[in-house]
Amino acid sequence: MSEFVPPTLADIRSAAARIAPHAQVTPVLASPELDALAGAELFFKCEHLQRGGAFKFRGACNAVWSLTGGEARRGVVTHSSGNHGTALALAARTRGIPAHIVVPEGAVAAKLANIERAGGILHRCAATLAAREETCAKVQRETGAALVHPYADARVIAGQGTIVPELLQQVAGLDVVITPVGGGGLASGCAIALRALMPDTPLVVAEPAGADDAYQSMRRGERVTDIQPSTICDGLRATIGAPNFALLREHRVEVIPVPDEDTVAAMRLLWTELKQTVEPSSAIVLAALLRQRERFAGRHVGLVLSGGNVDLDAIPFQGAPG
Amino acid sequence: MSEFVPPTLADIRSAAARIAPHAQVTPVLASPELDALAGAELFFKCEHLQRGGAFKFRGACNAVWSLTGGEARRGVVTHSSGNHGTALALAARTRGIPAHIVVPEGAVAAKLANIERAGGILHRCAATLAAREETCAKVQRETGAALVHPYADARVIAGQGTIVPELLQQVAGLDVVITPVGGGGLASGCAIALRALMPDTPLVVAEPAGADDAYQSMRRGERVTDIQPSTICDGLRATIGAPNFALLREHRVEVIPVPDEDTVAAMRLLWTELKQTVEPSSAIVLAALLRQRERFAGRHVGLVLSGGNVDLDAIPFQGAPG
């Protein structure tokens, strides 16, 4: 990562043009019921309706189409607990190149099935960062594939950032935008774009209280990497990336830690009121808003629903009281 | 019903103008995964994202705003197992008038909660057609409220029919349209509009095999009213209305009976692939298409997802294999 150069708004604009032939312009949905509950006007950017069921396709697609012809021919490789793996496989398919996906033990079954269906070649490894990186390096040596890191990658960050100009074109006058934060690709890309396009509209990010490394890192002013994640939000268990953390600091992004029980309640609300089958890692943005209801009252809030790859055999509110 | 005059395309156009200030233009969603599965191009008209979570708002709203000022002041009354009740309550609220909703025992809890939240005044009765009509008549006598029948009402049929011109404006070149059929308000309204606007594009309707009175009626050429409904599709248990049946016959609408197990499988697909929390009565349209895959292969198919008011404590595929 020594040569990491953060993307600019121009890079995000280029990414938007690069992915346009392949990515969906996702709709923005609203619900009078949820607005009444929140006491605010909520605009949900539906990235769970993106190709592959998550925003991850944007970054993966930008990375794949940024490769030279010679690089691309050898394929791409990544490690991912799920959505980024599917996204990279789908993106690689748009260019007709192989995608090697290193998946940790314990990943959500529905997400692994999605990766395989998208044409990705699975490589299983232990559920540690060391094992993932080692397996990735081995695949790289053997195939010459280009590594597309899930979040600590400027091309990926630029791709995820394309959500913001798209959202701002769909909804005028947003007072604040909320995204989830895991490794920080989405958060840092959106922070760059939002600061450039609407400097008075802050980005707030929601993080599971049981995997609050970004929150702790921002508080201490240095990257905290020793937290053992314990959260239902399987898409947000990654440790914040070094370049991602630097970008969140630079743009003074605020992190709201959210207990899983709030996220589960918000997920239920999104299923029943917005009628959208989003995953916990998406629902956390509504949970964060509802935890600080007074602060967001009366505001126009953009909320990024990041993904919808739910395992219907493990719905967290099965049997929960209505 | 002696004075029943079926609506024309002009009535449907008037209804569209009448409800425009209140109703949502619902989005059309697609899924490459579902297209691949069906071998066809599927365009899902998302009426579960209509106000109140179902297409029923269109008809109710048209009825409410068709009343004279004097009629409106005394309110409206209906009997409904759920979605029409919520719709009428919401529609009445847009005009500031009371809505009396007669609900049968055994109605879905989530739907009753929706009616109350929409401001409807609940009147409970036994789960028979006779009890419903008697209770309705009593409320009418006591309040002077205008009856807005869930489906055997020309204003309601015209309102439901507004889906078709809206859909045809969103998607060009549809070869066929599929809606569910219960009492037949949606089916007959769509049949009128489709015949007028795209006479070569047939309407096909999906009906639960366990409540196949429309299917039996069309086969026999006379209205069958003695079937005891047994289906998970709580929105499709009503007996086909007399004027609705006449319209389905006139427009030679084909009915596909669908076993509940197919509907449950289709519902799971819509949740996982389209990421839409639709109810069984919606999912039946995809189930009907998948039952006759060869027939629809290669076609452009419009499918009306009619509602999304699901009881999350009674998901039919809980614990089902992936």
Image (spheres, coloured by chain):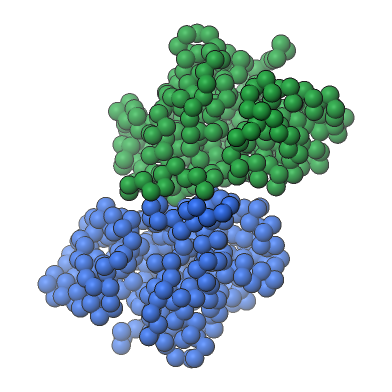
Chain colours: A blue, B green
Q: Is residue A48 above or below residue B322?
A: below
- Provide residue A133's location: percent of width, then percent of height: 24, 78
Q: Is residue B175 above or below residue B3?
A: below
Q: Is residue B121 above or below residue A292?
A: above
The quarter of the image holding the N terminus of chain A is bottom left
Q: Nearer the viewer, residue A281 or A318?
A: A318
In the image as oriented, which residue stretches furthest toward the bottom?
A: A221
Residue A51 makes an appearance in the image = no
Q: At 43% from the left edge and 67% from the top edge, which residue is drawn?
A: A233
Where is residue B188, by image quadrant?
top right
In the image as oriented, which residue stretches furthest toward the left?
A: A142
Residue B160 makes an appearance in the image = yes
In the image as oriented, which residue stretches furthest toward the top?
A: B221
- Provide residue A253's location: percent of width, then percent of height: 53, 80
Q: Nearer the viewer, residue A43 or A194?
A: A43
Q: At 19% from the left edge and 74% from the top edge, which residue is drawn?
A: A135
- Provide residue B300's location: percent of width, then percent of height: 39, 33
Q: At 52% from the left edge and 48% from the top edge, which residue is drawn?
A: B313
Q: Nearer the viewer, residue B63 or B182?
A: B182
- Provide residue A54's location: percent of width, then percent of height: 41, 60
Q: Is residue A184 left or right of residue B190?
A: left
Q: Is residue B251 left or right of residue A230?
A: right
Q: Nearer the viewer, residue B165 or A14?
A: B165
Q: At 74% from the left edge and 44% from the top edge, which residue is drawn?
A: B119
Q: Is residue B267 left or right of residue A71?
A: right
